Image: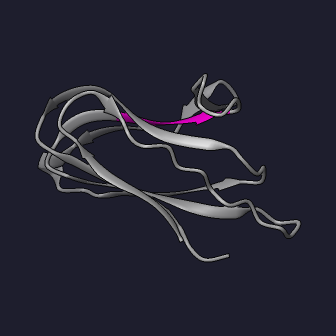
Amino acid sequence: MATVAGSFTATNQSATFVPIASARSTTNAFNIFLYGTAVATVQLERSFDQGTTWTKIYAASVQLYKWAYDGSTLINISESMEEPEQGMQYRLNCTAYTSGTLSYRISQGLQ
């Protein structure tokens, strides 16, 4: 099982997560979980070139997987993402930070 976990207490990026794409014709989901007491903005980013360039994820010109987290509401964020291509890299980027601690976990089950 692949897992990247940590926390943000300032603007920063997580470690890189490389999901395992399915050998079948279907995709294989991985999980993104955010929790804590922070006031911060975090986005999931993807790299097509082994981490040299990071891009936001869009569909129909709308940015996906971007969260304005306010821990005072005590709402945890849990999302799922699929990746059909081997070798893609992902990271969380905390682009704005006000206060608190925002913990994260990106994980994928056994294949």
The N terminus lies in quadrant = bottom right
- State the residue lying farthest toward the bottom: 110
x and y percent of residue 30 in the render?
57, 61
Task: Write the residue at 56% across / 73% down.
Answer: 109
Q: Is residue 105 visible?
A: no
Q: Quadrant of residue 15?
A: top left
Q: Quadrant of residue 22?
A: bottom right
The C terminus lies in quadrant = bottom right
Above or below, 13 against 89 in this view is above
Task: Write the residue at 66% across / 24% down.
Answer: 61
Q: Along the line of sight, which residue is nearer the eye, 5 or 29?
A: 5
- State the residue lying farthest toward the right: 25
Task: Write the residue at 17% across / 47% down.
Answer: 71
Q: Which residues are magenta?
A: 42-47
Q: Is residue 108 visible?
A: yes
Answer whether residue 43 is magenta in the image.
yes
Q: Along the line of sight, which residue is nearer the eye, 105 or 3?
A: 3
